[in-house]
Amino acid sequence: MRNKMGINQMPINAVMMPEMGLKTGSGGTAAKGGAAAASVKEKTTFELKLEGGFDSGSKIKIIKEVRMFTDLGLKEAKKLVEKAPTMLKKGVAKEEAEKIIENMKAIGAKVVME
């Protein structure tokens, strides 16, 4: 079997791991293709950034909305909104981020997903 597969030496490890693989004449092209596919991962978590430039009349609504999805107190949420542009939330799933952006745009805030 070793001669048929082109293996000259016995493996040093007693147990072969799946990632070790045997070279069967493919020249390692499968490994190169697998590395390219692994480098093109889809981003799953996002950061939400509050942009400045919103109406002062909608500021109270924005503070209330920020409190709802960040679990901050009134004072902390107010400081966060006042120092816009700033990071609102990190590590948010795409579906949740889109929902938050939609709610914030409805009340007049500009939120960017990064």
Image: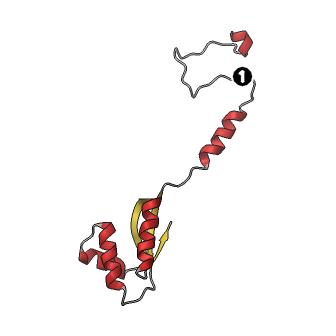
With 72 as the anchor, is 54 left or right in this view? Answer: right
Quadrant for the N terminus in the image: top right
Q: Which residue is mark 1?
A: 24
Q: Position of residue 67 (x, y in %)?
A: 29, 72
Q: Position of residue 82 (x, y in %)?
A: 35, 82
On screen, residue 78 above or below 92: below
**Residue 101 seen in the figure:** yes
**Residue 49 seen in the figure:** no
Residue under the point 59% across and 26% down:
20
- Looking at the picture, tell me which residue is in the foreground, 89 or 104: 104
Q: Quadrant of residue 95 in the image?
A: bottom left
Residue under the point 70% across and 13% down:
8
With 79 as the anchor, is 34 left or right in this view? Answer: right
Please state which amino acid type lies under the numbered disc 1: Thr
Q: Position of residue 93 (x, y in %)?
A: 44, 58
Q: Secondary structure at mark 1?
A: loop
On screen, residue 9 above or below 86: above
Q: Position of residue 42 (x, y in %)?
A: 56, 52
On screen, residue 19 above or below 54: above
Classed neighbour count for the residue bearing mark 1: other residues with Cα under 10 Å, few (<14), some (14–19), many (≥20) = few
With 73 as the anchor, is 58 left or right in this view? Answer: right
Residue under the point 63% across and 44% down:
37
Numbered circles on residues, count: 1
Q: Quadrant of residue 12 in the image?
A: top right
